[in-house]
Image (spheres, rainbow, N blue to C red):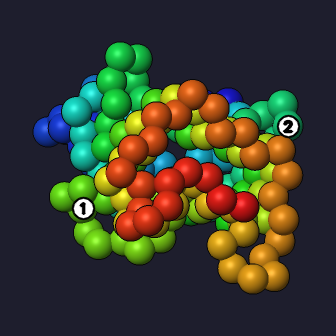
Amino acid sequence: MATYYVNNTLPAASNSNVGTNPALPWLTLSKAASTVTANDTVIVGPSGTYNERVTPSSSGGSSTRITYRANSGTRPIVRGWTLTGKSYITIQGFEITNQSMTSDSNASIIVTGSTGIHVLDNYIHDTTAFAVRSNPNNGAAKCHFLIVRDNEMTGIGPAWSGVAG
């Protein structure tokens, strides 16, 4: 069990850092997503903007979740998340948007073939597609125990708002 830090607003931020010291954080969420394992927490620092689609490489377990959360009282900006075949991951406290980001026609958060994903207390806005979408492709594996709670969503997609799947 480890706590890692990401904060691209600090001059000392680098993906070469170990990431466990808030004064020497990682630069990108992608670095965290490719490194963390079950029971780890990633705390994302204030005021950062991450023009990335975060795709975790590991899953947590039912009692050893992987948690990505904004530092207390902050709401870092992220372009999107893709959780395919990943389980027991929490995404909490982010601002998720396509506004002023690289063009992205995907849902803000894609969940496919996953179990126990929690999407909590995020502000999802000004997207080009769904806010949260499970099973975006025909024949994709089903999701189980997807919890989407206490999120604020506005300006979602060209013609439809909300959660699909």
Outermost residue on the front side: it is: 159
Residue 147 picture quarter: top right
Q: Position of residue 2 (x, y in %)?
A: 60, 31
Which residue lies under the disc numbered 1? 101
Q: Name the residue nearer the viewer: 154 or 18.
A: 154
Q: Name the residue nearer the viewer: 41 or 51.
A: 51
Q: Residues within 10 Å of mark 1 (few under 14, many from 20)?
A: some
Locate residue 22 relative to residue 10 in the image: left or right: right
Outermost residue on the left side: it is: 11
Residue 24 picture quarter: top left
Residue appearing at x 85%, y 52% in the figure: 144
Q: Position of residue 138 (x, y in %)?
A: 75, 83
Residue type pointed to by label 1:
Met
Judge whether residue 30 can be spotted in this image: no
Residue type pointed to by label 2:
Ser
Q: Position of residue 115 (x, y in %)?
A: 82, 51
Residue 22 picture quarter: top left
Outermost residue on the top side: it is: 73
Residue appearing at x 33%, y 24% in the figure: 74
Which residue lies under the disc numbered 2? 62
Closer to the N terminus: mark 1 or mark 2? 2
Asked which secondary structure carries label 1, the reply is loop
Q: Position of residue 21 (x, y in %)?
A: 39, 27
Residue appearing at x 31%, y 43% in the figure: 77
Asked whether the beta carbons under mark 1 and mark 2 sit within 8 Å of each other, the answer is: no
Residue appearing at x 34%, y 31% in the figure: 75
Examine the rendered structure and indicate whether residue 160 appears above or below residue 20.
below
